[in-house]
Structure formats: structure tokens, C-alpha cells
Image (cartoon, rainbow, N blue to C red):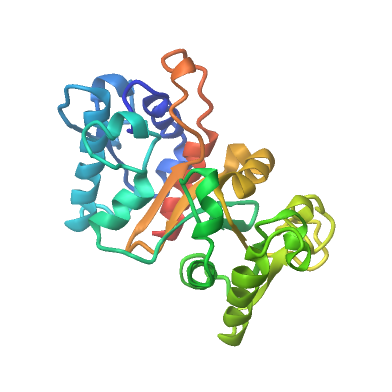
């Protein structure tokens, strides 16, 4: 259910009113039953006691992990929580992605977003912008490319994925003129991936990549002449997510690549400013639940 003070309870309740969604599988909601409102009779609710919002959010998550481990559930969809609040109870808490990877002992994982027939992953995830350049290494970029390729094949059933890798610097560094990371780390990672048989291009300039809906330079779109790319690798959080959310916010789903089970979530946050006002749009939560059902 996520943070009980946020819009998580509302979007979960609204999303589960869909008869088409309920026909896809069986649903268990973990959280605070009083906060959720009226759910369809087919939906099971597990109430977990808590004293504060951050404590509750992490307890709900821990219960979900327990259900996955004991095979009482096959997929997990998480509503948004407050990292700041959870960190009061779990020191150094960064987010769902890292917490779930740690719980299952997974080292090779990525935060991916999917919508419109394409997936996007981020090499450096939730880190301060000033730290990004030193974190861009050939190994990290290659690992993201390889995991994207494997995830598209194994989870999304794309036979021959096409992947684009965005450059870090303006114009992908202009051959080193505007920064060395693209030449020293990103290009070698792309070449390494190609040597492994992965269909990948890059580094490509990030400023124009999302601007061509009718050409193959951009992500996969229905009106693209040859389908575009199936996967995109961004170097840092806002580089990929600012345009991706601008294009696909209502249908965008966060998917954790590398886990031994399917985990999805909506692409928005807790939205405390509108919580409890019946204003929250459940579209992204509904899309997250649909994708979990499809991939599980």
C-alpha cells in the first residue's frame, strides 16, 4: 500500500475496481484496511499493524517479501512510499529497488521503466547529480546493457532487442571535446556488448533522442518506420525519466530487472499534497498491476 498518508491507498483501491484487471489474477493488498476503502470481495486484505507512516510502509513491504518467499504470491506491485520517512526505521534506505535486491541477495539489478513498447533503465539511479560522472564506468554501463538485453528477452519476450545507449555529456561528448566519459567508458561498453552479440548503438546524443517519433532515432512508437528501439539506457535519473515521464506518465510502469520475481510500481510518488482528496489518477497503478499479471 505504500505510505499510508500518501495517495497509495487511493490509487490501489481505484485500480482494483477494474473488472478487466481482476480477471487477470488474484490480488492480495497489504497495508491498512481502514485507509484502503471498499475493495471488491475477491481481493484479500492483510492488515499489518504500525505506529508511524514510515514504519508502516516498510512493514507492508516486508510482509510482501514474505509472501513472495513462501510462494503465496507470484508478483509484487508496490505503491509509493517516502524514502525520508522509511529511512527513520531502515538506515540508509535508498528505495524499493535496492531494498528488494538486498532482501533476495541480488547484485545485478536495475530500475527500469516501461511504456509505449519500450523499456528504459538508468545506470546510476538515485544518486546526487555531482556524483554521476565518477560512477559512469565501462563495467556499469556494460552491465546495464547486458541486463536490459536479458530482461527484454526473458521477461518481455522480445526475440532480438534493439538497445540505444545515451551519452552522458552534451552531444555525447563531441569525441571528447565536451567531456571524456563518453569516449573512455560508454563507447567501450557498447563495443563490448556488440562483441557479445547484443544489438546496441551509442553513445547517442540525449538531447535529440526522444524528439523523433517518426524516425528510428527514437524509442519504439507505432508510427516509427522500423519499430525503433526496444530498450534505452540513460546515464542518470532525470536524463531518462524527464522525457520518458513527459511522454508516458499515465501508462508508465517501474519494473525491477534482475529480481527472481516480477516487481512493478507506478511511476509517481506519494503526492502528499492531494492525498485523501479523491484527486489521484490510478492509471499508472493500474498499468503496474496489469504488467505484473502479464509477466508473472
Quarter of the picture holding the N terminus: top left
Who's the residue at 65% across and 57% down the image?
A: 168
Residue 76: x percent and y percent?
A: 34, 49
Quick check: can you spot residue 250? yes
Who's the residue at 58% across and 75% down the image?
A: 189
Residue 280: x percent and y percent?
A: 50, 23
Number of labels in the image equals 0
Quadrant assignment, res 165: bottom right
Front residue (pair 267, 70) = 267
Quadrant assignment, res 238: top right
Front residue (pair 255, 142) = 142
Quick check: can you spot residue 71? no
Who's the residue at 65% across and 73% down the image?
A: 187
Quarter of the picture holding the C terminus: bottom left
275, above or below 250, in the image = above
Front residue (pair 126, 104) = 126
Does residue 286 appear to the left or right of 33 in the view shown? right
Residue 237: x percent and y percent?
A: 55, 47
Residue 49: x percent and y percent?
A: 15, 27
Does residue 263 appear to the left or right of 208 in the view shown? left
Amino acid at each position: 500500500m505504500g505510505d499510508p498518508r500518501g495517495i497509495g491507498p487511493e490509487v490501489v483501491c481505484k485500480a482494483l475496481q477494474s473488472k478487466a484487471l481482476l480477471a487477470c489474477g488474484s490480488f492480495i493488498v497489504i497495508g491498512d484496511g481502514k485507509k484502503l476503502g471498499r475493495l471488491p470481495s475477491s481481493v484479500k486484505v492483510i492488515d499489518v499493524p504500525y505506529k508511524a507512516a514510515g514504519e508502516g510502509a516498510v512493514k507492508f513491504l516486508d510482509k510482501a517479501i514474505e509472501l513472495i518467499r513462501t510462494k503465496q504470491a507470484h508478483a509484487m506491485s508496490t505503491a509509493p512510499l517516502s524514502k525520508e520517512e522509511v529511512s527513520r526505521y531502515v538506515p540508509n534506505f535508498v528505495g524499493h529497488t535496492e531494498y528488494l535486491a538486498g532482501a533476495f541477495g541480488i547484485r545485478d539489478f536495475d530500475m527500469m521503466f516501461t511504456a509505449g513498447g519500450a523499456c528504459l533503465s538508468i545506470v546510476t539511479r538515485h544518486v546526487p547529480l555531482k556524483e554521476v560522472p565518477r560512477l559512469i564506468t565501462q563495467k556499469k554501463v556494460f552491465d546495464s546493457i547486458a541486463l536490459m538485453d536479458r530482461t527484454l528477452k526473458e521477461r518481455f519476450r522480445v526475440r532480438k532487442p534493439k538497445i540505444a545507449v545515451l551519452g552522458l555529456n552534451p552531444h555525447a561528448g563531441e569525441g571528447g571535446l565536451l567531456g571524456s566519459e563518453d569516449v573512455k567508458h560508454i563507447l567501450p561498453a557498447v563495443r563490448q556488448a556488440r562483441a557479445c552479440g547484443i544489438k546496441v548503438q551509442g553513445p547517442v546524443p540525449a538531447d535529440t533522442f526522444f524528439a523523433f517519433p517518426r524516425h528510428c532515432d527514437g524509442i519504439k512508437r507505432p508510427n516509427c518506420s522500423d519499430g525503433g528501439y526496444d530498450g534505452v539506457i540513460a546515464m542518470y535519473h532525470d536524463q531518462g525519466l524527464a522525457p520518458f515521464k513527459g511522454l508516458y506518465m499515465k501508462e508508465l510502469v517501474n519494473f525491477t530487472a534482475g529480481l527472481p520475481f516480477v516487481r512493478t510500481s507506478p511511476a509517481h510518488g506519494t503526492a502528499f499534497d492531494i492525498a485523501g482528496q479523491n484527486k489521484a489518477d490510478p492509471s499508472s497503478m493500474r498499468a503496474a498491476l496489469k504488467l505484473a499479471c502479464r509477466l508473472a
